[in-house]
Structures are given as structure tokens and as C-alpha cells.
Image (spheres, grey):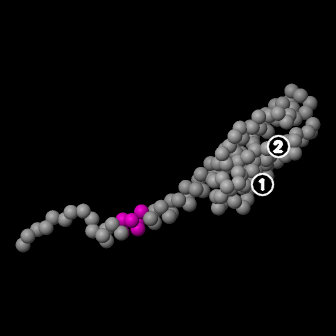
């Protein structure tokens, strides 16, 4: 009896390993994209809160809200004042950039592509905050 030494993997072992890796990837990828979407949304909410705080700080020192508060650039959201701030009100809106990752995210494409906050601290849509 001669003992043959095995070398490498058989084709069956390779197919099984690839199947397991594919299954793990199919489970992990949706969880990853959901997690990234929540992170992008959190960044937009933080920017909206920062801008609302800056508006209130401006109003505490002046008699009106300002339309000159600087916004920062976000990759996945466009932030704007809608309409322009008045003496007694403002509304800040973050809209998902068309074609961006946040707009394309399946979980967020229906309800959380537009976030807003106003002078009273009302946040819309409430289920996204």
C-alpha cells in the first residue's frame, strides 16, 4: 500500500468554501448598507441641529434670524433654508443628493430622503429623527 500525499484543495472543497463565503456576503452586505445609511442620516441631523443652534444664537443677539449662516458640505445631503429665514421663523431642510448613496439606499429612499427642522424645534419626518 502506498500512501499518497494530498496536495491542495479538491474542486468540491473549493465550491463549498465559495458557497459559504457567498452566503456570508449576502447576509452581511444589507446590514452594512443599512448601517452606513444610518451614519449618513446622523451626520445630516447633526448638521441641521448645528445650524438651528446657530440661528437661535444669532437671534439672541439680533432681532431676526440670519440668512447668512454657513452650511457645511455633506456628500449625501444638500442643506438649504426653505424659505429664507424671516424675522420670526426659519426652516432648514436636508435633501438627499439625487444619485447619491443615501437616495439610492433602499431603506431610506421612501421616508428619510428629506429631513427638516424649524424654529420651534419641530423635526420632520418624526420617524427619521
Task: Residue at 75% x, 50% y: name it.
Answer: 95
Residue 24 x, y percent position in the rendering: 46, 62
Tell me the distance, in whole angstroms, between the alpha carbons under discs 2 and 1: 17 Å
Direction from residue 30 to residue 63 in the image, left or right: right
Tell me if mark 1 has few (under 14), some (14-19) or many (20+) residues whose alpha carbon lies within 10 angstroms of its own.
Answer: some
Q: Confirm whether residue 74 shows in the render.
A: yes
Q: Is residue 128 visible?
A: no
Residue 80 left/right relative to 62: left
- Residue 16 occupies which quadrant of the picture? bottom left
The tag on residue 52 is none
Q: Residue furthest front?
A: 99
Percent position (x, y) of residue 21? 42, 63
Task: Say the numbered circle drawn on residue 81.
Answer: 2
Looking at the image, residue 112 lies above or below residue 64: below
Q: Is residue 19 magenta?
A: yes
Name which residue lies at 19% across and 65% down. Answer: 6
| The stretch drawn in magenta includes residue 85 | no
Name which quarter of the figure residue 63 lies in.
Answer: top right
Number of numbered discs visible in the structure rendering = 2
- Dot 1: what SS? loop
> Contact (CB < 8 A) between labels 2 and 1?
no
- Frontmost of labels 2 and 1 is 2
**Magenta region, mostly helix, strand or loop?**
helix
Of labels 2 and 1, earlier in sequence is 2
Checking the image for residue 125, the label placed there is 1
For mark 2, does the 10 Å Cα neighbourhood hold few (<14), some (14 to 19), or many (20 or more) residues? some
Residue at 66% over, 53% down? 100
Percent of width and height locating residue 106: 65, 61
Give the quarter of the figure containing the N terminus. Answer: bottom left
Span highlighted in magenta in the image? 16-21
User: Residue at the spot x=31%, y=71% of the render?
Assistant: 12
Amino acid at each position: 500500500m502506498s500512501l499518497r500525499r494530498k496536495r491542495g484543495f479538491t474542486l468540491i472543497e473549493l465550491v463549498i468554501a465559495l458557497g459559504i463565503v457567498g452566503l456570508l456576503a449576502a447576509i452581511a452586505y444589507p446590514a452594512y448598507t443599512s448601517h452606513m445609511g444610518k451614519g449618513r442620516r446622523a451626520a445630516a441631523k447633526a448638521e441641521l441641529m448645528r445650524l438651528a443652534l446657530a440661528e437661535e444664537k444669532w437671534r439672541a443677539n439680533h432681532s431676526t434670524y440670519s440668512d447668512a449662516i454657513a452650511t457645511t458640505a455633506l456628500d449625501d445631503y444638500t442643506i438649504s433654508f426653505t424659505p429664507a429665514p424671516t424675522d420670526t421663523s426659519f426652516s432648514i431642510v436636508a435633501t438627499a443628493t439625487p444619485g447619491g448613496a443615501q437616495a439610492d439606499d433602499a431603506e431610506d429612499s421612501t421616508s428619510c430622503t428629506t429631513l427638516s427642522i424649524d424654529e420651534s424645534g419641530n423635526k420632520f419626518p418624526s420617524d427619521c429623527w
